[in-house]
Amino acid sequence: MKNTFKNFEEYFLLFPEEAQQKLENLREFIHSLHYDLDEYIGYQMPAFSYKEKPLIYFAAYKNHIGFYPLPEAIRYFENDFEERKYKFSKGAVQFPIKEDLPLDLIKTMIEFRMVEIDQKKS
């Protein structure tokens, strides 16, 4: 994607309705976790920051939603990904587009990242 997106809405509109709904649900869920999260576009993906530090990124693909909680979180949650049979790499985990988003796992990863950021600021 060579486009530069100004906001989440512009990004979401590039995808089929099913993916748009998943992306919007994910966005709303993340906002519900903490009052002090800011949206931005980073690396051509929707992203959230916490205390002015990157928190997570996410992106839509044909068959999955890519979730990028940064490498330390990926390492920490590898066993969870393996148990649930999610594909993952050193920087991302893939949630199949045809399945419900694992909101419990997403919440735990975001909380992990927030603690990481809080500890680095101290």
Image (cartoon, helix red, strand yellow):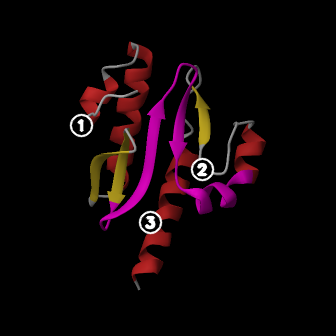
* Disc 1 packing (10 Å; few <14; some 14–19; many ≥20): some
Residue at 27% x, 61% y is 36
Say which element carries label 1.
Answer: loop
Mark pair 1, 3: CA separation: 23 Å
The image quadrant of residue 20 is: top left
Res 90 visible: yes
Q: Point out which mark residue 91 bears.
A: 2
Q: Position of residue 45 (x, y in %)?
A: 39, 39
Which residue range is magenta in the image? 50-78
Mark 1 and mark 3 in contact? Answer it, CB < 8 Å. Answer: no
Pick whichever of labels 1 and 3 is earlier in the sequence.
1
Q: Furthest residue to the bottom?
A: 122
Pick whichever of labels 2 and 1 is earlier in the sequence.
1
Q: Amino acid at mark 3?
A: Met
Q: Position of residue 122 (x, y in %)?
A: 41, 86
Q: Amino acid at mark 1?
A: Asn
Pick whichever of labels 3 and 2 is earlier in the sequence.
2
Q: Tell us which disc is closer to us: 3 or 2.
A: 2
Q: Amino acid at mark 2?
A: Gly
Whether 115 is drawn above or below 38: the answer is: below
Q: Point out which mark residue 7 bears.
A: 1
Whether 118 is drawn above or below 67: the answer is: below
Say which element carries label 2.
Answer: loop
Q: Position of residue 121 (x, y in %)?
A: 39, 80
